[in-house]
Amino acid sequence: MNLYQSKQYIEDVVAVADLDLSWEKLRDKCMLVSGATGLVGSFLVDVILRKNQEDDLNCTVYALSRNEEKIMERFAGYCGDKHLVFIPYDIRLPLVRNDIGTVDYVLHLASNTHPIQYSKDPIGTITTNIIGLQNMLEFAVAHHAARFAFASSNEIYGENRGDAEFFDENYCGYINCNTMRAGYPESKRCGEALCQAYKAQKGLDVVIPRLTRSYGPTMLMSDTKAISQFIKNGIDSEDIVLKSAGMQYYSYAYVSDSVSGLLTILLSGKSGEAYNISDESSDIMLKELAAIIADLNGKKVVFEVPDFVEAAGYSKATKARLDGHKLLTLGWRPRYDVKSGVERTISILREIR
């Protein structure tokens, strides 16, 4: 089975497609999505294609991914759909396409996003986030994009200085820049500044959704983030392996809520502004998250010491709770809290095995 055969997954896609958003801005338009086979990107593409079917939106999606076979497999349910155009592409290279005219919206979602990549490919992590972003910005300018959305990260906030319970969009915590692990958060910070530079110098309309730790049934089985490993343990009805004391206190978001937030910002956000996609109902300590998934499966939490390579990719932040009030003012509301979200994820992934 695949995700398109899951009733629960389709329900999630339809729920976002049926939201009261400014969809008319996408009617008869086209968008380019980098990272289209990723956790967030693939769900986003599914929502747009579903909206085309439901409301004749006539929005064309240019879906970018490094692996053509992978992208065709992921969107097998839409092969032959005139509104979906596959583009095999490494974003670290300039994107020059004379066969593509105006692209109304560019959404840059591609990024190395899990710990093993941070430690095994620190150069690729940085170049994807900076050179890749510049290539997408240049493409947006060349193709007269009406708006550019850069998917930033909760990691830009760094370590809590002990002076805030929640990080609003103006908070700036500590990052030790003279470390390999700093490559991801520092390059995301630099990326935001680069977006502002293109807004000032090139007149490009940009918005910056700051995604928190997202999860859901579109996760890649190769993902090494803690929550992804917990979910994989849960799918297999195994004990949940915790590789620390589990005191990290983070914000999380189910993928449909991440995408509904992203679309809200794209269609209604103020130009140049950043928005946290986060809700307090999905803030949880890592050990409590592990316990929830263990309880769902009648298993226990066990402790294991990570190897050096894996540990080197772990975030150094111990408390990173995002303040989502700014996005709430645009009308966004989450559909899942963290418990119902992880339960939904495990249920869908078991269903399609």
Image (cartoon, rainbow, N blue to C red):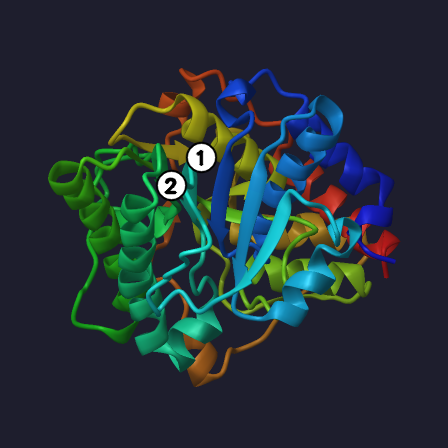
Q: Residue drawn at (55%, 25%), measured in percent from left and top?
A: 27
Q: x and y percent of residue 287 in the render?
A: 56, 54
Q: Is residue 124 left or right of residue 280?
A: left
Q: Residue drawn at (65%, 60%), measured in percent from left and top?
A: 230
Regarding residue 302, the answer to whether it shows in the image is no
Q: Which residue is mark 2?
A: 210
Residue 50 higher or lower than 250, as above or below:
above
Amino acid type of the residue tagged 1 in the rendering: Ile
Q: Residues within 10 Å of mark 1 (few under 14, many from 20)?
A: many
Q: Residue drawn at (52%, 78%), measured in percent from left and top?
A: 305
Residue 194 higher or lower than 26, as above or below:
below
Q: x and y percent of residue 132 in the render?
A: 33, 62
Q: Is residue 219 left or right of residue 144?
A: right
Q: Which residue is mark 1?
A: 277
Q: Residue furthest bottom?
A: 308
Residue 99 higher or lower than 309, as above or below:
above
Measured in 3D between alpha carbons, the distance from the residue under mark 2 to the one under mark 1, in whole angstroms, is: 6 Å
Amino acid type of the residue tagged 2 in the rendering: Arg
